Image (spheres, helix red, strand yellow):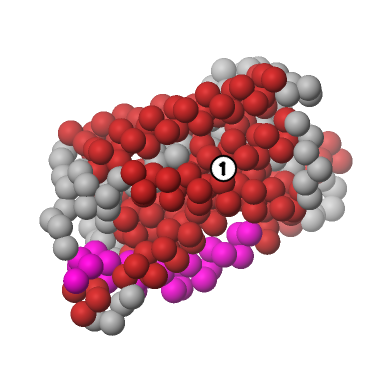
Amino acid sequence: MITAVIVLTCVSAGVVLCSLAWGTPTLSVATVADVLLGSAGVEDSHRFIVRDLRLPRVIGGALAGAMLGVSGAVMQGTLRNPLAGPELIGVSAGASLAVATIVAFRIPFPGIALPMAALVAGLITGALILTLVSLKANPMHMLLVGAALTALINALVIAVITLAPNFGGVSIIYRFLVGSLSNVQWDEIRLAAPWCLALPPVLLLAGRPLNLLQLGDETAEGLGLGVRRTRAMLFAASVILVAPVVAIAGPIGFIALVSPHLVRRLLRTSDARVVMPVAAVTGAVLVLAADTAARLALHPHEVAVGLWTALFGAPALLVLMQQGIFRPRPSS
């Protein structure tokens, strides 16, 4: 396990440096380091490229990936369903619809409160899914209901964007349908930062109840856990982690679903106290790698990061399904 964590840490550092260095123009690692350290003698153009163009995008991508990775781990453990993820049960789509409506129609809404709108819409969508699907149902049932609801909401997003008086073109569609980091600047980082403060408490407090929920409802109750109250609080926490991501970058898919599964296989443990923090790092790495590919693969054209995460996540989902990871759990 220690070896895996060390390797993941090195990969994370490498991905961050590549994200900051690669592009037009491509900078050396030494130049990037000099800019970050504030060394004298760095060209103003290089300082602008790193600090004002690439660094906020890297920080935004890392925060988005970390929040999604932990959200996926919490949601899967809370619902005891390996298919649970904000992108598959409509939470991300519902949050995206709320933010897209506010932005597209220029509704007078404080920018700092955009994540709150995403949170409320995500909670409503999630509650609707949980009302339609029993926690003890076959995971594939949740997938089908979630996919149907997500398709409906995405259609509404398209309608909102195209009917809005200030239609923003392809870029705004990319942002609110698949997720894009192209518009992330320091203002967006400041918007999301207060909401990211929810991440440490979740990492510190959610591990034990998630581990107890894995034992089944009756066993968890016998060990003193208020299952219904805890499940509601943890589900709300998972949506809180998604809200700022959707507000600044849109519904980046498959990161929340895949990251926890990768961690469980890499570290060979289901202990939520281990899975959550490592899933945060894994999610950040995946988003940054996808965003780097989005910027460079078809240069000078940029593809939305959400399309690249789908190119990775959809095959990964199929592999996991083929290996039988989504067998329904025994009823409690």
Which residue shows up at 53% across the image and 40% down it?
Answer: 94
Q: Is residue 206 magenta?
A: yes
Give the x, y percent position of residue 22. 62, 33
Q: Is residue 205 magenta?
A: yes
Tell which residue pokes out farthest to the front in this image. Answer: 131
Check disc 1 and give the amino acid type: Ala
Question: In what quadrant of the picture does the N terminus appear?
Answer: bottom left
Relative depth, front residue between 180 and 40: 180
As drawn, is 154 to the left or to the right of 214?
right
Q: Which residue is mark 1?
A: 95
As drawn, is 275 to the left or to the right of 176?
left
Relative depth, front residue between 34 and 65: 65
Give the x, y percent position of residue 138. 20, 44
Query: Does 254 appear above or below 117?
Result: above
How many circles with numbers are drawn on the protein? 1
Query: Does 187 appear above or below 275?
Result: above
**Residue 280 in sight here:** no
- Dot 1: few (<14), some (14–19), or many (≥20) neighbours within 10 Å? many
Which residue shows up at 73% across the image and 24% down it?
Answer: 164
Give the x, y percent position of residue 290. 50, 34
Query: Does 151 appear above or below 332?
Result: above
**Residue 248 in sight here:** yes
Which residue shows up at 59% across the image and 36% down it?
Answer: 97
Give the x, y percent position of residue 104. 73, 30
Tell which residue pokes out farthest to the bottom in this image. Answer: 224
- SS under mark 1: helix
Q: In which quadrant of the rendered view does residue 217 lie?
A: bottom left
Tell me the magenta residue range.
195-218
Which residue shows up at 34% across the image and 67% down it?
Answer: 228
Relative depth, front residue between 160 and 76: 160
